[in-house]
Image (spheres, grey):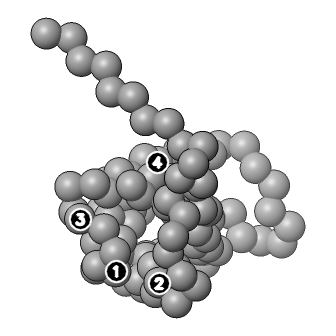
Amino acid sequence: MPHCIVEYSAKIIESLPVEQLMHAVYKGVNQSELFTAANIKVRACVYNDFYLPGAEQVFVHVNLKILSGRDLSQRKNLTDSVSNQLERLGIEDAVITVEVTKIEKESYVKKITLTV
């Protein structure tokens, strides 16, 4: 944990490699000091088709999925840290949003299948 899902509009990659976007999210989560670096997982999903009212055609939305147990102050620190790293990328004319989704520990299942 956490699982960091980065959703972004395709137009962003005209000026910014997706790896930089993902690294900014990773760095923001790591700087929050809530998780060990080795446990931070970042995935990205590009959107070619979407509707945004107005002229904005660039967006980044980050969903930080974490196990329940963190208080509001910790969650706010996490979203602020990630948001700050994304702002440093200098993405112009973009809508950038970051949210935390709590995962219930009691219902979460993780299985690792290894072949030898």
Q: Which mark is residue 36?
A: 3
Q: Are marks 1 and 2 in contact (CB under 8 Å)?
A: yes
The residue lying toward the viewer, choosing from 38 and 109, is 109
| Cα separation between marks 2 and 3 | 15 Å
Image disc number at residue 44: 4
Crowd around label 3: few <14 · some 14–19 · many ≥20 (10 Å) = few
Q: In this rendering, does residue 60 appear at all?
A: no
Type of amino acid at the residue the image marks with label 3: Thr
Q: Which residue is mark 2?
A: 74
Q: Nearer the viewer, residue 87 or 2?
A: 2
Task: Kindly state the secondary structure of the residue where label 3 is placed.
Answer: loop
Judged from the image, the secondary structure of the residue bearing numbered disc 4 is strand
What is the x, y in percent for residue 58? 62, 65
Question: Where is residue 21 shown, x and y percent of the image?
Answer: 39, 62
Q: In terms of secondary structure, where does tag 2 sit?
A: helix
Q: Position of residue 26 (x, y in %)?
A: 32, 64
Give residue 72's quadrant in the image: bottom right
Q: Earlier in the sequence, mark 2 or mark 3?
A: 3
Tell me what residue is drawn at x 83 percent, y 72 percent: 54
Q: Which mark is residue 112?
A: none
Which-is-in-front pick, marks 4 and 2?
Answer: 2
Query: Dot 1 lies on which element?
Result: loop
Identify the residue position indicated by label 1 in the image: 32
Inspect the image, locate mark 4, and give the three-letter code of the amino acid beneath it. Ala
Q: Residue at x 31, y 19 (%)?
A: 113
Label 1 sits on what residue type?
Answer: Ser
Between label 1 and label 2, give the one nearer the viewer. Answer: 2
Crowding around mark 1 (Cα neighbors within 10 Å: few <14, some 14 to 19, many 20+) is some
Residue 101 as seen in the image, left or right of residue 13: right
Is any atom of residue 101 visible in this view? yes
Cα distance in 3D space between marks 3 and 1: 10 Å
